[in-house]
Amino acid sequence: MLVTRQPVFRKFWHPVMPLSKLQGGTPQPFTLLGEDIVLWLGVDGEPHALKDRCCHRTARLSKGRCVNGALECGYHGWTYDGTGRVIRIPQLDEGREIPAGYCTPAYRCRAAYGYAWVALEEPLAPIPEMPEYGAPGWRTIFQFHEVWATSPLRALENSFDNSHFSFVHRATFGVAAQPRPSRYELFERDGGFHAETVIAATNPPAFHRVSGCTEPITQRHMRNAYFLPFARRLDIEYPSGVRHVILNGFTPIDDGRIQLCQWLFRNDTEADCPAQMLIDFDHVITREDKDILESTDPDAVVDLRRRGVEFSMDSDRPGILIRRQLMELLAAHGEAEVHR
Ligand code: FES
Ligand SMILES: [Fe+2]
């Protein structure tokens, strides 16, 4: 599935970058679904997103600077507000008005969970809800955002796939001696599904503060939720009562790259397990996924008829459901699947 050929994905919110990256006052470029955009913070601290192209002589606006909450092009100083309208032309003769229509496209941009999220067109669904964010007894850790050479569908299949732990993650939490995947319970809902299972997880002493458990093999009760089109929430509960809740946005950059965004919410304290230890722990695991995913073909097809063999394997059911829901989304919005 080549994401840039499916305009419906422009109608969803995608996490683009941490607000902290914008706080230095320098506009930042990003590519979303093949579209070059620029982001900056207004004086009120709210993020804005425009097409990264000046309407004068096409310079990239991300090469400009922020001035009093507006964005000044680095070539001749034409200045834009958050709606994309040119509000200043330094060379214009005194008393002359800026002609209407001098503008560049603006996109919907919103702050959520410490990130700027962008929808290139009117969104069909809200940003996934994370009730743990800012809730008493919970802490939020901004773990990482990084570029992977794969597609969002490949990353999503992987994030619901419980048959790869004994292979991809055998050096970390996977139990090599137990390759048979546990069974998922699947519950469909509007805009996604909920998938629940319990797995065995290796728990060496180095992981004890992460799990809150000391047994050599522990259990993870996994409540995994899919949000159309490219987000998921994974709530891992250990027997200790520790909850390790991950939010992932698999932001489509173009047809061969995504940006993995990962937040972590925990119901413990820094004294129980330092944030940096949790970042390092999850980063090692996601690097294991990155390494294998980057060896796959990013043009993962959605059409179920192309992958009949998977119907026979129980552990592929979540991936099949993701494809079916994506296929229904594409069908509902009048776009056909594109195969290479
Ligand atoms: S190209 Fe932007 S002001 Fe000239
Ligand atoms: Fe994995």
Image: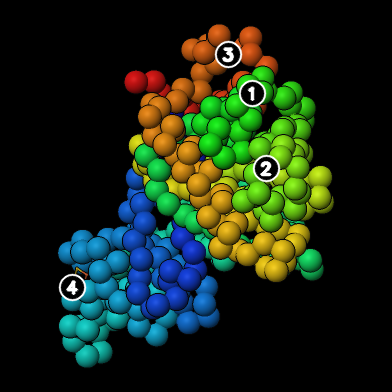
Q: Position of residue 280 (x, y in %)?
A: 53, 55
User: For the residues marked 3 and 1, what is the alpha-carbon distance in whole angstroms?
Assistant: 23 Å
Residue matched to label 3: 310
Residue 140 as seen in the image, left or right of residue 76 = right
User: For the residues marked 4 and 3, what is the alpha-carbon distance in whole angstroms?
Assistant: 54 Å
Q: Position of residue 202 (x, y in %)?
A: 66, 37
The disc placed on residue 75 is: 4
Please tell me whether mark 3 sits on a helix, a strand or a loop: helix
User: For the residues marked 3 and 2, what is the alpha-carbon distance in whole angstroms?
Assistant: 31 Å
Determine crowd level at label 4: few under 14, some 14-19, many 20+ residues with C-alpha closer than 10 A: some
Q: Amino acid at mark 1?
A: Ala
Q: Is residue 3 visible?
A: no
Residue matched to label 1: 177
Q: Amino acid at mark 4?
A: Tyr
Please report the residue visible at 65 percent of the width from the left and 44 percent of the height from the top.
204
Q: In which image quadrant can residue 41 be found?
A: bottom left
